Image: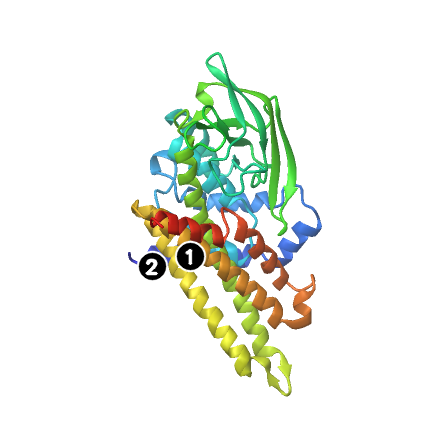
């Protein structure tokens, strides 16, 4: 694997860093939270991001994209993570768009992807249920056969950015038992379709989610995404790619939390010297630096393994998520503690990274889940 960046990748990363620096700030994030913004993000910024072409990074040129890879998208997501940007790159592009890209018919791709890449359409993937935890095969939502179509009944929770999505991708069981991999099908629904009810939720870090209820929603054969009864494999593939993207975002978040902490250690005076000159705090900062660099390597390895179709790509993803879950929480915890009393206040920005670390830690599986998954994939 080539871990170094090409000139084009470096330019992309630097452009994303400049965009975040010039157009977003933690003051904006605070205002969105405190004002209970209806969208939870900036649609104007989303249009700007689309204009830069970044929404098309992972999509084929035939679908209107740039034909690049997850590694390139990860570079953008890392910079977005540094600024805690809430724009729906993860939910709309990697989750919703990823499902259409990898499982959609030619007609579905033509109807959805150009508008998605242009920033005119938002997607959300509704796959989690109250009892499912991290088990993608645990699907109680039923799709009952009616003629050549189906009627969907069930409930999905924590649908990322589901309240603003124009269209929803919903997993439902068309055959088999509640925890069987086979028998799951993904369906593409309109947000306002009869029988669809969407209630906004908020995660502990202020991000957007939704509760989606399905009460006899009628769908036809053209609404099925991928093979009927074969949605389990498609869902697993999409979630792995989204997990790698989330890891890149987490990497950016831990980098900023660490940078804020280092700056405080260099400026806070105690006993006539900067507290960063104290040996104990130097050691803790050195440990953090090392852990973040290990996380960086794991994230790049996961993104490149997925791009290359590596046979052990799932193991790379689990290694990265376990590493990033532990390290982001460590960086945020250490940041709050080393900021002392002010770190515990809502007025200080370091707390935003602690909340984001806690929420991201359990998204797509926490560190314990992914260590267990890694071991199982290794045959243990």
Q: Identify whether 323 is placed above or below 120.
A: below
* Mark 1 or 2, nearer chain start: 2
In the image, 328 versus 74, the foreground residue is 328
Residue at 47%, 57% (x, y): give it.
Answer: 324
Q: What element carries label 2?
A: loop
Residue 27 picture location, percent across and down: 64, 58
Q: What element carries label 1?
A: helix
The image quadrant of residue 212 is: top right
The image quadrant of residue 58 is: top left
Give the position of the N terminus as an image quadrant: bottom left
Q: Identify whether 21 is placed above or below 118.
A: below
Residue under pointer 2: 5
Q: Identify whether 208 is placed above or below 343.
A: above
Residue 75 appearing in the image: no
Residue 334 picture location, percent across and down: 57, 68
Residue under pointer 1: 13
**CB under 8 Å between callouts 1 and 2?**
yes
Q: Which residue lies furthest to the front in this view?
A: 380
In the image, 110 versus 81, the foreground residue is 81
Q: How far apart are marks 1 and 2 (CA)?
A: 9 Å
Residue at 48%, 33% (x, y): give it.
Answer: 179
Residue 340 picture location, percent across and down: 65, 72
| Residue 321 in the figure: left or right of residue 158 | left
Residue at 57%, 63% (x, y): give it.
Answer: 332
Q: Residue furthest top?
A: 147
| Residue 280 in the figure: left or right of residue 248 | right
Q: Residue furthest bottom?
A: 272
| Residue 58 in the figure: left or right of residue 334 | left
Residue 112 picture location, percent across and down: 46, 31
In the image, 371 versus 10, the foreground residue is 371
Residue at 35%, 38% (x, y): give it.
Answer: 60
């Amino acid at each position: 694997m080539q871990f170094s960046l090409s000139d084009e990748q470096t330019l992309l990363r630097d452009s994303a860093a400049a965009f975040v620096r010039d157009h977003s700030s933690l003051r904006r994030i605070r205002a969105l939270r405190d004002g209970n913004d209806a969208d939870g993000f900036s649609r104007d910024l989303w249009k700007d991001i689309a204009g830069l072409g970044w929404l098309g990074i992972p999509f084929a040129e035939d679908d209107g994209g740039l034909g690049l890879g997850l590694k390139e998208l990860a570079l953008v997501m890392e910079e977005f993570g540094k600024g805690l940007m809430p724009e729906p790159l993860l939910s709309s592009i990697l989750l919703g768009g990823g499902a259409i890209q990898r499982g959609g018919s030619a007609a579905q791709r033509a109807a959805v992807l150009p508008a998605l890449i242009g920033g005119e359409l938002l997607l959300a993937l509704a796959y989690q249920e109250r009892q499912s935890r991290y088990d993608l095969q645990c699907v109680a939502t039923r799709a009952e056969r009616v003629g050549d179509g189906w009627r969907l009944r069930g409930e999905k929770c924590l649908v990322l950015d589901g309240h603003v999505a124009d269209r929803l991708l919903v997993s439902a069981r068309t055959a088999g038992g509640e925890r069987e991999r086979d028998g799951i099908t993904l369906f593409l629904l309109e947000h306002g379709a009869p029988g669809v009810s969407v209630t906004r939720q908020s995660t502990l870090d202020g991000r957007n989610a939704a509760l989606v209820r399905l009460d006899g929603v009628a769908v036809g054969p053209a609404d099925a995404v991928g093979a009927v009864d074969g949605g389990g494999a498609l869902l697993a593939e999409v979630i792995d790619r989204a997990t790698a993207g989330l890891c890149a975002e987490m990497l950016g978040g831990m980098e900023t939390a660490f940078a804020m902490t280092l700056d405080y250690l260099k400026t806070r005076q105690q006993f006539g010297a900067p507290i960063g000159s104290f040996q104990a705090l130097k050691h803790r900062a050195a440990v953090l630096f090392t852990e973040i660099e290990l996380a960086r390597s794991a994230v790049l390895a996961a993104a490149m393994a997925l791009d290359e179709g590596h046979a052990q790509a799932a193991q790379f993803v689990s290694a990265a998520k376990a590493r990033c879950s532990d390290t982001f929480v460590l960086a945020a915890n250490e940041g709050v503690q080393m900021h002392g009393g002010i770190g515990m206040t809502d007025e200080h920005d370091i707390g935003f990274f602690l909340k984001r670390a806690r929420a991201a830690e359990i998204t797509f599986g926490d560190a314990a889940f992914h260590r267990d998954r890694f071991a199982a994939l290794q045959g243990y």
